[in-house]
């Protein structure tokens, strides 16, 4: 009896240790796997050439990733600018101003928004945002545009990131001690002054981390952006031009990947690049969050 | 001075309320629009038929292949993720209970993994597939999606497990149970509602994700009958049909989008309902 219980204990321990090792080693396995696939390209060209060149001619083995990196950064930047004020204001409203019941009503709303697949956002972008830009926004600025633009990508991305950032912000604001807020109010501060001087200052590190993680999320988003951003290889800085983010590059070209030499390596290199950038951003800001949490 | 304060307070109160209500409005707008557009083209045929010849030129048929393919892939992925994720989460909370630093380090890695975009998992899944000598197939899709949702399952389950009172751990051990018995008979049972939420959350993520199955699962008009056959998925069906120039096919993409949205909403409702139902009987 005791023997069989011990045996079961042993088996379950081994099973658990194997599972946890798979998970802990997963980032390394992904990194190494992508690196091995990308290494033929890295042997052919130096890292500087790949990242700094703007010529993209896969048939002539010219792989310049700069247009794609800039495309990704540009779309991310726009979505960031649009998402930040909305997130910050509604997080403040939900945690400081609104009633408990409204908060309870908002929880499922945020969760559903966060849980909608990116294809749905893409469909919505194509139905709503793209025609809106080509019919109203672009003519307003005197530009002709198809609507499949960097701006459309930025807007769709912003809406996708808002619930994600908002959830983290609400968590940050909820950790701020009520005593501090009450002290500020009892000294005669208005609600907004309390928010400005206590909540935002105290939650500073958490707020920055939430936005940092939001950027990482926007940077790696694929389908929704790809559907509305136009996908043309060019470096332009007008909001009404098409862009071509790194993620869309990978997703769009998987079909031709194996028919052109070095092309698969190039796409795997793009994936590796994304993986490294996003993992780094995540590690840095998560570290921030852990630091602030353990300080309390 | 006082006046300025009051005005500032008013302005920001209103601004923040607008920001919040506009979120609700956006959600309502997205869902209503998808439904209105989708129900125009949605018919019973869409749900119960596979694409017939000429479907992509506006001919007869439906997206049953994609619905079934998506369900196969996400259910398979959930099974694998549960098989690895449950013991991992239990290990963090049972065996590592005394090693706070290791616990936190593992959670840190998991959180970072959660943030890795699905296209990277897709590319990695593709590399793995070539390495193992597989073709684009149901199995490759399942493995890729399982990797994608693994951190979600572990982290969400773990989040619930770490709220279980320490006294329960000690009481179990004091009664002479082994760690395995404690993990599976006590801690697992207490965390069960959390597990359901975790699995459903992961299921929703898995069924809606397109970028990870783009390379690995392939696309086919048939319902897969074997693990080594390619499988269609609902998000990809939407994506491909939407890029067609023919209006009827595009209409069907909207219908497929409505089907996907309904599935996601149902999953989210079930998750809410179950976690409420089960957490009533839990120790606090």
Image: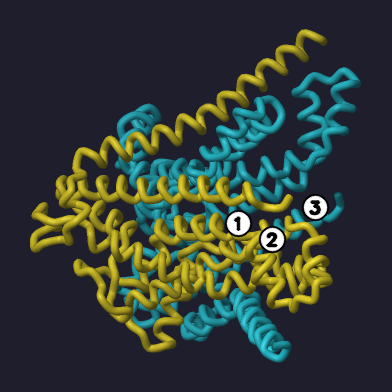
Chain colours: A cyan, B yellow
Pointers 3 and 1 in contact (C-beta within 8 Å): no
Judge whether residue A284 can be spotted in this image: yes
Residue A47 figure quarter: bottom right
Measured as percent of width and height from the top left, residue A129 is found at 37, 38
Residue B67 figure quarter: bottom left
Q: Nearer the viewer, residue A191 or A236?
A: A191
Question: Mark 3 and mark 1: span between their CA atoms?
Answer: 22 Å
Chain assignment, label 3? A
Q: Secondary structure at mark 2?
A: helix
Chain assignment, label 1? B
Residue in the picture at 65% in, 81% down: A12
Question: Mark 2 and mark 1: span between their CA atoms?
Answer: 8 Å
Q: Is residue B113 left or right of residue B42?
A: right
Foreground label between 3 and 1:
1
Measured as percent of width and height from the top left, residue B22 is found at 51, 29
Q: Which residue is mark 3?
A: A293
Q: Residues within 10 Å of mark 3 (few under 14, many from 20)?
A: few
Q: Which residue in the rendered view is the most extreme toward the top?
A: B3
Q: Which residue is mark 1?
A: B194
Q: Which residue is mark 2?
A: B161
Q: Residues within 10 Å of mark 2 (few under 14, many from 20)?
A: many
Residue in the picture at 45% in, 81% down: B128
Checking the image for residue B85, the label placed there is none
Q: Secondary structure at mark 1?
A: helix
Measured as percent of width and height from the top left, residue A99 is found at 66, 25
Report the number of discs: 3
Chain assignment, label 2? B
Pointers 2 and 1 in contact (C-beta within 8 Å): yes
């Amino acid at each position: 009896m005791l023997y069989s219980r011990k045996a079961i204990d042993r088996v379950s321990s081994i099973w658990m240790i194997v599972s946890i090792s798979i998970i802990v080693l997963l980032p390394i396995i992904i990194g190494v796997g992508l690196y091995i696939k990308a290494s033929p390209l890295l042997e052919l060209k130096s890292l500087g050439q790949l990242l700094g060149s703007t010529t993209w001619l896969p048939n002539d083995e010219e792989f310049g990733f700069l247009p794609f990196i800039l495309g990704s950064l540009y779309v991310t930047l726009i979505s960031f600018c649009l998402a930040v004020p909305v997130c910050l204001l509604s997080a403040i409203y939900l945690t400081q101003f609104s009633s408990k019941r409204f908060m309870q009503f908002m929880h499922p709303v945020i969760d559903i928004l966060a849980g909608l697949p990116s294809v749905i956002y893409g469909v919505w972008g194509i139905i709503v945002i793209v025609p809106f830009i080509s019919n109203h926004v672009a003519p307003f600025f005197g530009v002709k545009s198809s609507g499949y633009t960097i701006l459309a990508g930025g807007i769709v991305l912003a809406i996708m990131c808002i619930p994600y950032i908002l959830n983290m912000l609400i968590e940050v604001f909820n950790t701020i001690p009520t005593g501090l807020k009450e002290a500020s109010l009892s000294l005669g501060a208005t609600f907004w002054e309390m928010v400005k001087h206590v909540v935002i200052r105290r939650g500073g590190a958490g707020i920055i981390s939430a936005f940092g993680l939001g950027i990482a999320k926007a940077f790696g988003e694929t389908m929704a952006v790809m559907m509305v951003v136009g996908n043309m290889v060019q470096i332009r800085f007008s909001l009404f031009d098409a862009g071509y983010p790194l993620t869309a590059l990978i997703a769009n070209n998987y079909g031709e990947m194996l028919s052109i030499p070095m092309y698969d390596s190039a796409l795997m290199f793009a994936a590796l690049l994304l993986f490294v950038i996003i993992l780094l951003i995540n590690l840095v800001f998560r570290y921030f969050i852990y630091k602030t949490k353990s300080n309390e | 001075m006082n006046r300025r304060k009051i005005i500032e307070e008013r302005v920001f109160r209103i601004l923040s309320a607008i920001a919040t209500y506009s979120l609700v409005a956006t959600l309502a707008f997205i869902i209503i629009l998808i439904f209105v557009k989708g129900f125009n083209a949605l018919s019973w045929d869409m749900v119960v038929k596979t694409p017939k010849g000429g479907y992509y030129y506006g001919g007869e048929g439906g997206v049953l292949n994609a619905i079934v393919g998506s369900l196969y892939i996400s259910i398979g992925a959930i099974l694998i993720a549960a098989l690895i994720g449950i013991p991992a989460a239990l290990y963090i909370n049972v065996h590592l209970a005394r090693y706070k630093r290791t616990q936190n380090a593992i959670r840190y890695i998991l959180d970072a993994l959660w943030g890795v975009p699905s296209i990277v998992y897709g590319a990695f899944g593709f590399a793995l597939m070539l390495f193992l000598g597989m073709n684009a197939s149901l199995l490759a899709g399942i493995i890729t999606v399982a990797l994608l949702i693994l951190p979600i399952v572990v982290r969400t389950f773990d989040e619930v497990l770490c709220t279980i009172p320490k006294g329960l751990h000690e009481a179990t051990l004091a009664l002479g149970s082994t760690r395995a018995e404690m993990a599976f008979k006590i801690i697992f049972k207490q965390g069960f509602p959390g597990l359901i939420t975790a699995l459903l959350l992961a299921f929703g993520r898995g069924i809606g994700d397109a970028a990870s199955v783009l390379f690995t699962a392939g696309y086919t008009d048939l319902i897969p009958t074997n693990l080594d056959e390619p499988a269609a998925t609902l998000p990809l069906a939407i994506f491909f049909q939407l890029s067609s120039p023919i209006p009827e096919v595009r209409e069907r993409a909207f219908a497929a989008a409505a089907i996907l949205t309904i599935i996601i909403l149902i999953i989210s409702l079930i998750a809410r309902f179950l976690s409420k139902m089960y957490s009533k009987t839990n120790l606090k």
